[in-house]
Amino acid sequence: MDRSRRLEVWRARRGRLVLVVQSDFVDFDTILMMPLAPLGEIRPTRDAHPLVEVEGRNNILVGQQITAVLATELRERVTESS
């Protein structure tokens, strides 16, 4: 598996999109990430839930669900960090 980088969007094992927020300067077996929810799946709060466009669709960054997952949970890189 390719190594994930900060601010890349990945598809996790169950198909959910996640944003990697872990620093590129650490190399752990786990990755700190925030899930993305399709617009309309949850009710966003403007200050707490920024919109992120992925593959032409708006998604809500669900910051309150920040978590660490095993790096092997990330299946497919969707966007590259800039």
Image: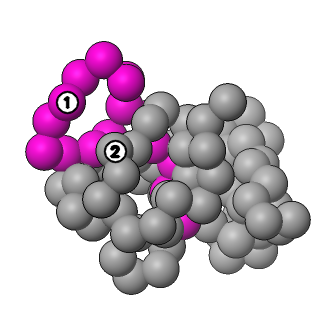
> Quadrant location of residue 36?
bottom right
> In terms of image quadrants, where is residue 3?
top left
Q: Position of residue 7 (x, y in %)?
A: 55, 36
Query: Which residues lie in the magenta part?
Result: 17-32
Q: Residue furthest left?
A: 29
Q: Which residue is mark 2?
A: 3
- Along the horizontal axis of the image, is 22 left or right of 30? right
CB-based contact (under 8 Å), mark 2 and mark 1: yes
> Is 18 inside the magenta-drawn segment?
yes
Q: Work out whether residue 59 or residue 82 is closer to the camera in this orientation and state it.
A: 82
For marks 2 and 1, give the CA distance: 9 Å
Quarter of the image for residue 22 reads top left
How far across and how far down the image is residue 16, in percent?
49, 73
Local crowd at mark 2 within 10 Å, few (<14), some, or many (≥20)? few
Q: First in sequence: mark 2 or mark 1? A: 2
**Residue for badge 1:** 27
Q: Is residue 48 left or right of residue 31?
A: right
Q: Quadrant of the C terminus?
A: top right
Q: Residue at x 70, y 71 (%)?
A: 38
In the rendered view, would you say 14 is above or below 28?
below
Give the amino acid type for the residue marked by disc 1 in the picture.
Asp
> What residue sits 44% from the left and 36% below the top?
5
Is residue 26 rendered to the left or right of residue 60?
A: left
